[in-house]
Amino acid sequence: MILKDCKIFMDVFNKKKKIAVLGSTGSIGTQALEVIDMLPDRFEIAALTAGDNIDLISRQIKKYSPKYVCVKQKETFEHLKNIFKQTEFFYGEDGLIKIADLKELDLILVAVSGKIGLKPTIRAIKNKVNIALANKETLVMAGDIVMSLAKENNVKILPVDSEHSAIFQCINKREDVKHLIITSSGGPFRTASKEDMENADLNEALNHPRWKMGKKITVDSATLMNKGLEVIEAHHLFNMDYDDIKVVVHPQSYIHSAVEYKDGSIIAQIGNPSMHIPIQYALTYPERLEGIETESFDFFKAAKFEFFEPDYEKFPSLALAIDAGKKGNTYPVCMNAANEEAVFAFLNKKIKFTDIYKITKKIYDSYEGINSPSIEQIITEDEKVREKTKLLINSLKKEV
């Protein structure tokens, strides 16, 4: 009997964690798979989802042999299912929800970009699957609903962003916390003049000094909108008043964020600028394991840590995002949707860099929020704002 109990214990202990990676061909998704490659005895890739990168998702299917795969387009679905006969394929938003509904999953990494991450996250929470969250829109658009559902279903929301992972690692007793300190590199235009920013081209905006990320989030980092979105996320993740969340510009990006306690102590998470570390911690939590990052932080090579106040006049998108968070209801939905459409227009070279804020602000100022919205209302408002923003962008193009 003892031997049988021991075997059961060892089977449970040695059980691989079954993971779904939503957005496996993106920046976070590919880095997550690199982390998993270093810990093959710990994880099993049960499901992958991808957008339009057929070549990469095909290589990933060959390598990891996931039981389930979801792709964006029906054409890709038809193409791949005829090649990989052992894999069950889905497509579109309904396919993502089916992945999130899988009962055998232990963890879902939500690394898709945009509002498409919201519904699968909610479905996974209702399915009582823990979430490693790298999708900003989920909490920006519906933070109150998501966190309430997570609490109700006893589901962990494990932050993947380096800033929120840092805070997560630094918090001991939430009731003892006085302030959250979110650090920012300052982006590519930290020392630029307003005139430089007015004339900035796409390559300059995408030239982030510290992090290699997707294009949309890199542009958001250039406007500091990204930091405003992170403030909203931190408010929901850690149940913290907006007035108690501080943004500090730290160009070296060695301190990923910090927590100030009511006794005056500050605990910071320090490390090399690498997304592998927060990704791995979210995947292995509550354990810490040796993984892909083997180089120790070198304090002597780092030499100096600098800190500056954000320039809210030069980077008004930061203030706009925080204002939307404080207003609550569907104001963050409006702000996020308008900004995203403006960023897409800039990426497609339809507008100037500084037009991103101007367009977002104009849409935001004319918006009236909805109190205590449902998920359906949030999605409807998002679509309405996007349509209105596109019309504004098109009208500006005609004027030019």
Image: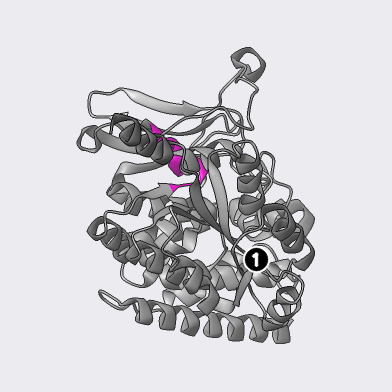
Quadrant of the rendered structure where residue 51 is? bottom right
Inspect the image, locate mark 1, and give the three-letter code of the amino acid beneath it. Ala
Q: As drawn, is 106 to the left or to the right of 79?
A: left
Q: Is residue 76 above or below residue 163?
A: below
**Residue at 41% across / 50% down in the picture?**
231
Give residue 160's position: percent from left, percent from top.
Answer: 49, 46
Q: Is residue 145 above or below residue 207?
A: below
Say whether residue 63 is visible. yes
**Residue at 25% across / 38% down in the picture?**
174
Give residue 310's position: percent from left, percent from top.
Answer: 50, 43
Q: Residue lying farthest top?
A: 300
Q: Is residue 124 magenta?
A: no
Q: Coloured how?
A: one colour
Give residue 54's position: percent from left, percent from top.
Answer: 76, 68
Question: Quick one: 66 or 225, which is closer to the camera?
Answer: 66
Q: Is residue 161 magenta?
A: yes
- The part of the chain drawn in magenta is 159-169
- Secondary structure mainly formed by the magenta segment: helix
Give residue 302's position: percent from left, percent from top.
Answer: 63, 20
What residue is shown with label 1?
50
Q: As drawn, is 122 to the left or to the right of 229?
A: left
